[in-house]
Image (spheres, rainbow, N blue to C red):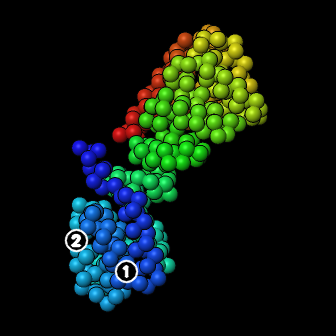
Amino acid sequence: MIAILALMLTLTPEQRQQLEGAIETHLAGELASAEMGYRAVLEQHPDFVPARAYLAEALWLAGRKEEARQTLVQVTEKHPELLLGKWLRFHFGDDLGADEALLQRLESTYPFAQRRFIATGTASLILVSRGETAPAVDDFRRVSMLDPDDVRTHRRLALAFAEARLALPATEAFERVVSAMPQDRHSWKQLGSSYLVLQRWQSAIDAFENALGLERDDVGVLLAQGYALERLAELDEALERYRLASRLAPTAYQPQFRMGRAFLAQHKLDRAERALTKATELDPNAARPLGFLGELYLKKKDLDKAISVLEQAVRLEADYLEAFYYLSQAYQRGGRTADARAAIETYERLKREKRGRRE
């Protein structure tokens, strides 16, 4: 059903050219020709609101104000793009009452005063900016079906969704971009990051590999790909990425920290200790390497060192819940029952707060 709908709604290259031609004649003041072009598109796609909005403006400029208003009336509540219709109604002289804040947001999002045209997908951006995520995603998917080859719009939507932490539609939009522009390294990176949020580890690895194929020495991508490999327990492959990242950025603590974490997962405690210690030397204010060192010293049954580094970790990062968990264990094993109870209570509180933020 979705495939059929997509086929029905997709603008053909000829229809896109027809729409662009109508916009050009509109800007040139040839309003009758623009009207014909918009109506031709709307015959095939009556729900294509941008064309309806353009048609309304052309009719208004031609002095056919009532026809312009009637054209906009056909934009129904089913369409998030109704926001654009509301703006145009206001622009055409209709009073929207207390909707001033919305109008200001629309004007800041799209420069109507400069006589530029509404891009497909603008409604999605407006809705995301207002926190109305569900209709924004619905509108984005309709936009994608209407014009799947509009790379610029899909990139803008993808970045907006990623910023709003809407990983699934961001992924869909970035997939559209890279399918049309496989040399777009930045979009491959963003796509991989979206896959990470969705815990689609192999997809993330593949996306990052495409990014690395375009620039092999990207430390951030190497670290991200290594993380995905860790999650699939492909630790040797992850370590290979981290070693390369460390050679490229020898003063950065992250590659050493990631190596230490991978060695710890492999139960190679001495190697893990060297890497994690090196990470703390490179950045004494980084809490995570200290937390993993605490876990390591617990495995080595060195309680004094475990307590020392874990206390330092929670001083640096007060909501580091894993460090509080291991600190409670270290206190308990050292006979410090009251301290152990306080640490585990903090751990439970932080865990509840984290769960609440996710919900």
Residue 21's spot in the image, x, y percent?
A: 43, 72
Give the left or right position of residue 256, taking residue 128 as reference.
right
Establish if 210 lies above or below 309. below
Q: Position of residue 248 (x, y in %)?
A: 75, 34
* Residue 33: mark: 1
Image check: 301 left or right of 96? right
- The kind of secondary structure element at disc 2 is loop
Q: Mark 1 is on which residue type?
A: Ser
Q: Is residue 77 left or right of residue 265?
A: left
**Given the image, on which type of amino acid does mark 2 rest?**
Gln
Q: Number of labelled discs?
A: 2
Residue at the outermost front position: 14
Label disc, if present, on residue 18 of the rendered structure: none
The residue positioned 43% from the left and 85% from the top of the image is 29
Dot 2 corresponds to which residue? 74
Q: Residue at x 60, y 28 (%)?
A: 226
In this view, the residue in front, 87 or 211, is: 211
Inspect this view and state whether residue 25 appears.
Answer: yes
Query: For the residues marked 1 and 2, what is the alpha-carbon distance in whole angstroms?
Result: 22 Å
Tell me the SS state at disc 1: helix
Circle 2 packing at 10 Å, graded few (<14), some (14-19), many (20+), is: some
Q: Residue at x 25, y 76 (%)?
A: 71
- Point out residue 105 in the picture as x, y percentages from the top left corner: 42, 69
Q: Quadrant of the C terminus?
A: top left
